[in-house]
Amino acid sequence: MTAITQWPALREIPESKEYKLLFERAIWGKVDGQRSDYRWIARSPGFKGDSCAVQRALTLGLEDKPCPLVLWHASEGSFYAVSCYPSRARDANGRSGFLEKQIIEWRPDGVPAAIGALTLLGIACGYTDEDWIARSRDPGWLRPDFSIGLDTMTVTVGNDTILAAISGGLRSLEGILEPAMTDFYTGLAHWISTPATAGPGHRAAPGLLETESQLGPAALAVLLLPFEENDAKRLSLAGGLPVSQVEEEDLKSWSGVVCRSRAIVRGASEAAGDASERKRANAIVTALRRHEPPPRTEFLLEFAASDERWLDASSLPAPGELNASEIGLVHDAIKVVNNEAALPTGLPESLQKARVEHLRAKADVIRAAASAISPKQFHFPEATKWIRSTLQKWGK
């Protein structure tokens, strides 16, 4: 089984560590027999989602087709693991067909977001309306601020449990067609590359994953694993859509959405993403099919295709032997930069010379990174002095 720290989203954690997760709870829905609209049915004392109106972000269109599904939502340093299911409630007029949500609110303390998703989504699915249904005739419901009290909860989980969840989640993804997975990860990669500060008109649409059924808690959580923690902690994923149709604009709170068909999402375009993002998606999907993390040198290819000039030492994976695919990506990255240096630009000679020198230095940054990751496999004598200088700056 793949070591837990080989997954990009979990790269920085110790192999033997246990994680203590403190979380708050809430229930959002309609109360049986009452005239009130959707409301907070129950809350624990430290729950903050009501004050920041998280229920709006967790709403998926009209929600006119209630069904069991899970959601993972990131919001300003807090994470929400949500289990949705058709409500048993009928309002005062006898109407039914509502969606109830069991919501876990978690504020991590140095624990990666993916650990929270792999743990808390499953816990959320274990909660039911038994917490409140017997009190549906309580006169307190006449007050708009009334809700039932829930306990703040704590769970401790170890790496063996996390690895078991990863294994189960990966098995659950096996039935999804590869083109659908590739389109989805291309969309996610494009969403990640869009600045978080982009205005509404420039916000990237969520990646759509077309599959016949909703994803379960472990399957939804493992979708985070191929991304480094800084990216993984930004992602909000919906494991299904409880709607007959929804406007793409109504999904603006989400990075990725599982749906039966793109046709359900009005206004949805084909999967966004450029050639480098699709290539990254292909590498991720190929790796997931093998139940393995994506290649550790994939970031070098992304760096080669970007406008960046320098790699931060924190972006380098832990040293270790690279496989053939990872070695090939290093050479591909160097080739991308060298090919760019050879392109005619029409610039004045002095500017063209400076451009080529810059790109040669960028290629040496890639060589230095390869040497830092696997010094036994990569030795570039043609740039030894410069590479050594770079490695010293990185403390390698």
Image: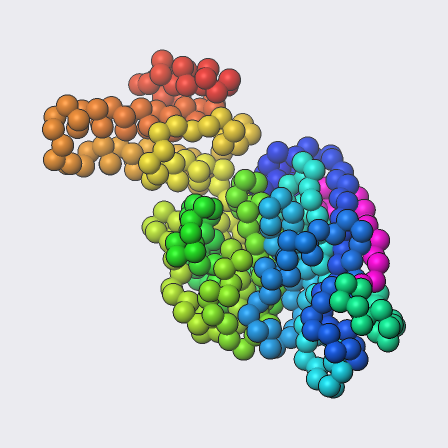
Spot the residue most to the front: 143
Residue 385 lies, with reference to residue 76, above or below; the image says above
Query: Is residue 336 in view from this perspective?
Result: yes
- Asked if the stretch drawn in magenta spans residue 392, the answer is no
Give the side of residue 371 with respect to residue 359, left or right: right
Please report the residue visible at 12 percent of the width from the left and 35 percent of the height from the top.
346
Please report the residue visible at 49 percent of the width from the left and 37 percent of the height from the top.
296
Give the side of residue 261 with respect to residue 366, left or right: right
Q: x and y percent of residue 374 in the render? A: 48, 26
Residue 362 lies, with reference to residue 293, above or below; the image says above
Give the side of residue 381 with respect to residue 262, left or right: left
Residue range (magenta): 147-166
Residue 130 lies, with reference to residue 396, above or below; the image says below
Query: As rendered, which of 171 and 34 lies closer to the eye?
Result: 34
Q: Which color scheme does this rendered protein use?
A: rainbow
Query: Is residue 261 in view from this perspective?
Result: no
Query: As rendered, which of 310 and 332 lies closer to the eye?
Result: 310
Q: x and y percent of residue 56 in the render? A: 60, 62
Q: Quadrant of the N terminus?
A: top right
Please report the residue visible at 65 percent of the width from the left and 66 percent of the height from the top.
69
Query: As rendered, which of 294 and 391 lies closer to the eye?
Result: 391
Residue 101 lies, with reference to residue 393, above or below; the image says below
Please report the residue visible at 70 percent of the width from the left and 37 percent of the height from the top.
109
Q: x and y percent of residue 203 in the render? A: 43, 54
Q: How many numbered tags mark residues here?
A: 0
Asked which quadrant contains residue 232, the reply is top right
Q: x and y percent of residue 224 in the render? A: 57, 49
- Asked if the stretch drawn in magenta spans residue 163, the answer is yes
